[in-house]
Every structure is written in structure tokens, then in C-alpha cells.
Amino acid sequence: MRSKVAHLADVVRLSARKPIETQGNEEFVEADLADADAVMRMVEGCDGILHLGGASSEMAFSRIMDGNILGLYNLYEAARAHGHPRILFASSNHVVGFHPQEAHLDADARPRPDGLYGVSKCFGEALAQMYHDKFGQETAIVRIGSCYEQPTDRRMLSTWLSFDDFASLTERVFAVQRLGCPIVWGVSDNDSLWWDNRQAAYIGWKPNDNAAQYRKEVEAQTPTPDPRDPVAVWQGGHRTQEPIYTDD
Ligand code: 15L
């Protein structure tokens, strides 16, 4: 992804809790999302924010809270202090993980998160909407499916988002004249789709890739699941079965 979005800005500022080696037009600002001052420094001078930070899977609530709840609040407060740069917020399909796979959802679907991680993304979506309604802050709430080089299991034949499609979505989010605060399903143009992006059509994003090109390979490498297996029942797949993790 780094190399695919590098051309979108004269200078790309990367940020993480630990140093990352920079290349080309990149610079680095170290920041822990839970540290409000560090997040202020990270956002100062930015024209746009591609927010992929925080917890990206189910884990102990303390870590989810630091990265995805306190961290997101810090990010939106920093954006408010620094002229409301447009944000692409990486939300997740796990906001709706407890919808069945035969349901076809649009942006009005009721959240049914499949764990604390999904709940934290519901918080992020609500926060983005509130900063939009109160202050005009623009955010693309992108409910990413499965963003990997290629689909590796049967569920991903429906949820896969290719790196190229994510890059072209990022480009549209920062190029479109009026963004507002849409919910965008971050998914490629797969033959099997659970999500409907019509409400975000105005941003002009057209994914090109299709997980179907990997179908034979995936089916040959993975057993046919029992249709009652949660992996085959719920949109969130195996995540619906994860426990509540604790710190110890
Ligand atoms: C996510 O939200 C995660 O960040 C990623 O690791 C995958 O688990 C993905 O969802 C998915 O559902 O495949």
C-alpha cells in the first residue's frame, strides 16, 4: 500500500509507535495514538489522513481502548485543531460480523459487531459522523473486507479487497470535490458480494479486481466447510467465535 499511495502527496508522513525506515518522499513522525500531544504533532501540517492505525484484530480491551477509542478521539481532536484535513478511516466488516452471509447489506444496515474490535470500529464510525455533523469534518468510513495480496480462504471470495482497489479508493477519497461522511464497503468487484455500495457511488470509485479469479485455487486448498460452521454462516467468519481476551 505504501508504494501505491506515495504519488498522492508531495510528502507522505508515516506514523507508528516505533520507527519505520522511510524512502522516497516519505517522512516519519513517531506517535502512540493514546498520546494526545504526539497525535497533535503527527497531524500538524497534514492535508489528508489515511488512518490505518490502532488495533486491527480482537485483543484485550485495554489495547483496543488505547488504539481505537482513545486513539481515535485524539486523532479527531487533532484534526479539529489543525483545519479538518480529510480522513479515510479504516473501519471494518467486523462492524456487521453477526449478519448472516446470505444478507445483502447497504450503508443503512444495523451494526452487529462480532467482538470488541468490531465494537471499537462502531465507536469510530459514530465519532466520524459526529465530527462531520458538528464541525463539517469529512471522513470516508471504509468498512474494509479482507485486504490481502490475494484471497486465501472461501470467505474471502466475498470479502477480498485487492491492494490496487484499496489504492484507487484512497485516490478517489482524497480527489472527490465533496466527500461528506459516506460509509464505503471496502471490497473488490467480486462475483460473490454481500455489500452494496450504491449510496457511496457519488465518490466515483470503481474496483477492478475480482476474487473469482482465485476461486479454483482457494477451493482446492481449503476444505468445504460444514454449512452450519460459523465460518460459513456469519459475515465475520471465525471472528464471531473469538473469546473476550483479557490482559493476562
Ligand atoms: C479486519 O478487520 C482485520 O483487520 C483483518 O486482519 C482481517 O481479519 C479482516 O478484517 C477480515 O475480516 O478478513
Image: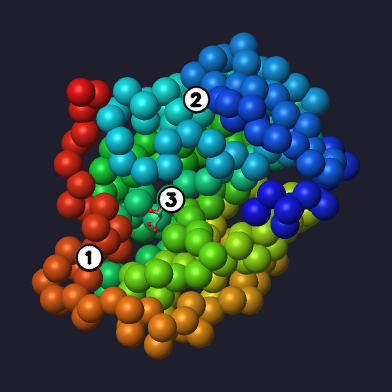
Residue 216: percent from left, percent from top: 40, 87
Q: Does the residue labelled 3 lie within 8 Å of ligand 1?
A: yes
Residue 181: percent from left, percent from top: 59, 46
Q: Dividing the image into 4 quarters, which one contains the N terminus? A: bottom right
Residue 123: percent from left, percent from top: 40, 35
- Assess disc 2: are there few (<14), some (14-19) or many (≥20) residues with their C-alpha within 10 Å of its C-alpha: many
Q: Between label 1 and label 3, give the one nearer the viewer.
A: 1
Secondary structure under tag 3 reads strand
- Label at residue 71: 2
What's the residue type where badge 3 is placed? Ser
Color theme of the render: rainbow
Q: What residue is pinned by disc 3? A: 92
Residue at 42%, 36% in the rendered image: 55
Q: What residue is pinned by disc 1? A: 231
Residue 218: percent from left, percent from top: 38, 79
Q: Which of 20 and 33 is in front in this view?
A: 20
